[in-house]
Image (cartoon, helix red, strand yellow):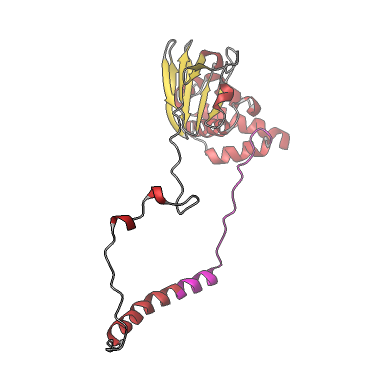
Amino acid sequence: MAQNRPLDSANGVRLAREAKGLSIRQVAESTKLSVRVIETLEEGRIGALPEGIYRRAIVRAVASEVGLNPEKLLRELSSAHPAELPAPIEASAVVDTPPARHAFQGVLAFVGAILPLLAGVAYFGWPAARPNDPAPAVTRPLRAADVWRPEIVPAGGFTEAPPALSRPVIVTLTISSKCQLRIVADGREVLGRTVEQGESVPIELGDELLLLGDNAAAVQFSINGQAGRMLGAPGEVLSVRIGRDDYEDFLARY
């Protein structure tokens, strides 16, 4: 029975789509995915979908479009395909012990209430200075030489120097033939549509750039003017992450 679950879950996507009267192409156009990706999901071939966060995004997008619960479908597919669609790891939250937290807050409240009272008693009840008491110290105004300046802080002093401005990294995409392309920069979608031959798309690289599409060979690129390597064969699904820390690995080596 467990072996039939992936087929049932995948068929559920197809049945839900057909129940809404939608064709695969209509779903592909609405979700900005390729027809091939929709067919692959409905056939239950999860391992053939683009890897990484895009695989879960595909399941969510298609489930929402055909009227299924995205998280329920993800759980079913993740249970049936643990290697291809592992469940996300949830970080355990550190829970403060309520009695200790409340006791500490009570101490803070007490100190905050008593300090102004003590300050008032000291100000109004302290005896006046007697003739033999030493004169209070006179506060003199600061001179220019007394003012703290960054250039006179000793080595390893009190503040760290601001980091040097990083060099901008510009990724320029050039489309060699019509294809579906989705671009996600730092978690924000900046493009998701059919692109035409000859289009050029410049993007400043932040932390990471995701390139997703249905024809890897149709997307060429350069980084700061230096040619990038091929991202895949003609007709191959494009799913590439270019990070700020590894973008030089994507440059062409001659």
Q: Nearer the viewer, residue 240 or 249?
A: 249
Q: Quadrant of the N terminus?
A: top right
Q: Quadrant of the C terminus?
A: top right
Q: Is residue 89 magenta?
A: yes
- Can you say whether 205 is above or below 76 in the image? above
Q: What residue lies at 29% left-to-right and 61% top-to-bottom?
A: 142
Q: What residue lies at 52% left-to-right and 24% top-to-bottom?
A: 212
**Residue 112's image quarter?**
bottom left
- Residue 1 visible in the displayed image: no
Q: Nearer the viewer, residue 125 or 216?
A: 125
- Can you say whether 160 is above or below 52 in the image? below
> Magenta region's main secondary structure?
loop
Q: Position of residue 171 (x, y in %)?
A: 47, 22
Q: Nearer the viewer, residue 81 or 156?
A: 156
Q: Position of residue 87 (x, y in %)?
A: 62, 41
Q: Position of residue 15 (x, y in %)?
A: 56, 29
- Residue 206 visible in the displayed image: yes
Q: Nearer the viewer, residue 175 or 133?
A: 133
Q: Which residues are magenta?
A: 83-107
Q: Position of residue 163 (x, y in %)?
A: 45, 40
- Can you say whether 50 is above or below 175 in the image? below
Q: What residue lies at 59% left-to-right and 48% top-to-bottom?
A: 90
**Residue 54's image quarter?**
top right
- Can you say whether 228 is above or below 165 in the image? above
Counting the numbered discs, the total is 0
